[in-house]
Image: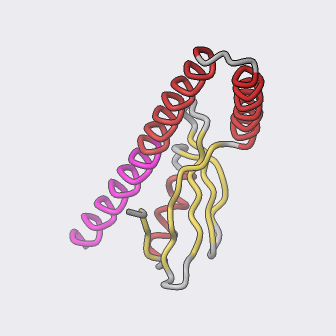
Amino acid sequence: MQQTITKNPENLEILYKLVANGFYQGSVESIKFELEGKHTTNYRIVGRLNKEDKFVVKAEPKFSHNISQKIMLALGISACIILLVKRNWIIPLLIAIMGLASLATTRGKKKRELDRFMSRFLDFVKQEETKNSLN
């Protein structure tokens, strides 16, 4: 299931406040936003506007992390091919297991980063609702 945020002035203001209050660094525009957390992770939050006028929110790896993953994948595949040609099955099997473990941890980190963003966003939404109800 994709996380979405409806595009309206209130939600855009909340995204600006997340940057202004120091939770994230990045840019917020009318058709997209890209935010990087101040905490040390290799992921950024990206939201792009879809046809239904909602931001589809995803956690994507930062550029440097993305390149290193691709290099390691290419090295692992080429090592597996060479070792399988030489009829060595144990090392490619270990490389495949380590690759699956890395994939699982990557997905877990993406989900945690996205959950952290959505919880902060919803906290700001609740704060705005309480301010409006008091007025």
Eyeballing the image, is 32 above or below 73?
Answer: below
Q: Residue 76's x, y, as percent?
A: 70, 27
Residue at the location (74% across, 29% down)?
81
Which stretch is magenta? Answer: 113-135
Eyeballing the image, is 67 above or below 25?
Answer: above
The answer to which of 63 and 35 lies nearer the viewer is 63
Residue at the location (42% across, 41% down)?
112
Left or right for 53, reference 72 = left
Eyeballing the image, is 82 above or below 46?
Answer: above
Q: Quadrant of residue 43?
A: top right
Q: Quadrant of the N terminus?
A: bottom left
Q: Residue 59's x, y, as percent?
A: 54, 50
Question: Is residue 14 a member of the stretch shown in magenta?
Answer: no
Q: Quadrant of residue 36?
A: top right
Left or right for 4, reference 99 = left
Residue at the location (57% across, 75% down)?
49
Q: Quadrant of residue 38?
A: top right
Main SS, magenta region, reads helix
